[in-house]
Image (tube, helix red, strand yellow):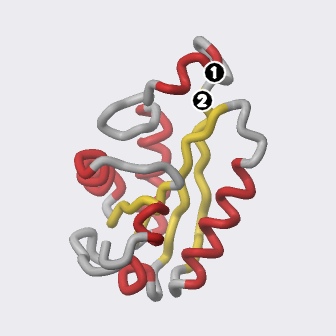
C-alpha cells in the first residue's frame, strides 16, 4: 500500500498489513485490552495486524506526572521508539500504522514519512468519511 493512499479507513485497511501503536501511562493496566479492541476494529475492516508497539510513559524520568506532555510534539513517541517502529514498518512493508492515541495532522505527516506508510488514529475508525 502506498503511503499517500486516501479514502475512508475501511478501504485503506482492507487487505493491508497493519501495525498498532500506543502511548500509555505506566499506571494504565488496561493497555493490552485497548490494543485488543483496536486490533478487532482493524480486523473487522479487513486489515491484518502484524505487530504491536507500546511506549509506556511515567515508568522513569519523572514518573506519571510527566504523562500529560508528549515525548515529542512531532511524533508523540520518544525518538528511539519512533525509530524502532519505523524500522519494523519498513522491514514488514506495512501499509498502515494505527495509533490508539489521537494524532494531529502534523504528527500523521511526520510519522508517515518516518514509517513509510499511512498513519491514522483509532479515532479515525469511528469517524465516517475520515
Residue at left offset 61%, top offset 39%:
24
Task: Measuring from the top left, give residue 102's x and y in whole percent.
Answer: 43, 50
- Mark toward the start of the polypeptide (1 vs 2): 2
Residue at horizontal 43 percent and vertical 42 percent from the top: 82
Name which quarter of the figure residue 8 lies in: bottom left
Relative image position of residue 130 (x, y in whole percent): 31, 72
| Picture disc at residue 2 | none
Q: Considering depth in this image, is 43 or 17 the residue closer to the camera?
A: 43
Crowdedness near tag 1: few (<14), some (14–19) or many (≥20) residues, C-alpha within 10 Å: some
Residue under label 1? 64
Give how far apart the Cα atoms at labels 1 and 2 are.
Answer: 7 Å
Q: Left of 110 or right of it: where is 99?
A: right
Are dots 1 and 2 in contact, CB under 8 Å? Answer: yes
Q: Position of residue 21 (x, y in %)?
A: 53, 53
Q: Badge 2 local density, few (<14 within 10 Å), some, or many (20+)?
A: many
Location of residue 83 by image quarter: top left
In the image, residue 46 above or below residue 22: below
Quadrant housing the N terminus: bottom left
Left/right of residue 20 with respect to residue 124 in the rendered view: right
Residue 96 x/y as whole percent: 41, 69
For disc 2, the marked residue is 57
Q: Is residue 69 above or below residue 2?
A: above
Amino acid at each position: 500500500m502506498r503511503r499517500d493512499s486516501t479514502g475512508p479507513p475501511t478501504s485503506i485497511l482492507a487487505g493491508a498489513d497493519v501495525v498498532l501503536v500506543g502511548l500509555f501511562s505506566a499506571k494504565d493496566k488496561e493497555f493490552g485490552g485497548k490494543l485488543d479492541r483496536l486490533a478487532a476494529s482493524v480486523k473487522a475492516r479487513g486489515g491484518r495486524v502484524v505487530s504491536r508497539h507500546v511506549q509506556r510513559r511515567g515508568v522513569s524520568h519523572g514518573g506519571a506526572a510527566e504523562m500529560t506532555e508528549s515525548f515529542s510534539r512531532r511524533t508523540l513517541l520518544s525518538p528511539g521508539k519512533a525509530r524502532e517502529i519505523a524500522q519494523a514498518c519498513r522491514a514488514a512493508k506495512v501499509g498502515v500504522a494505527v495509533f490508539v492515541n489521537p494524532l494531529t495532522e502534523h504528527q500523521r505527516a511526520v510519522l508517515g514519512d518516518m514509517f513509510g506508510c499511512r498513519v491514522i488514529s483509532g479515532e479515525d475508525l469511528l469517524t465516517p468519511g475520515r
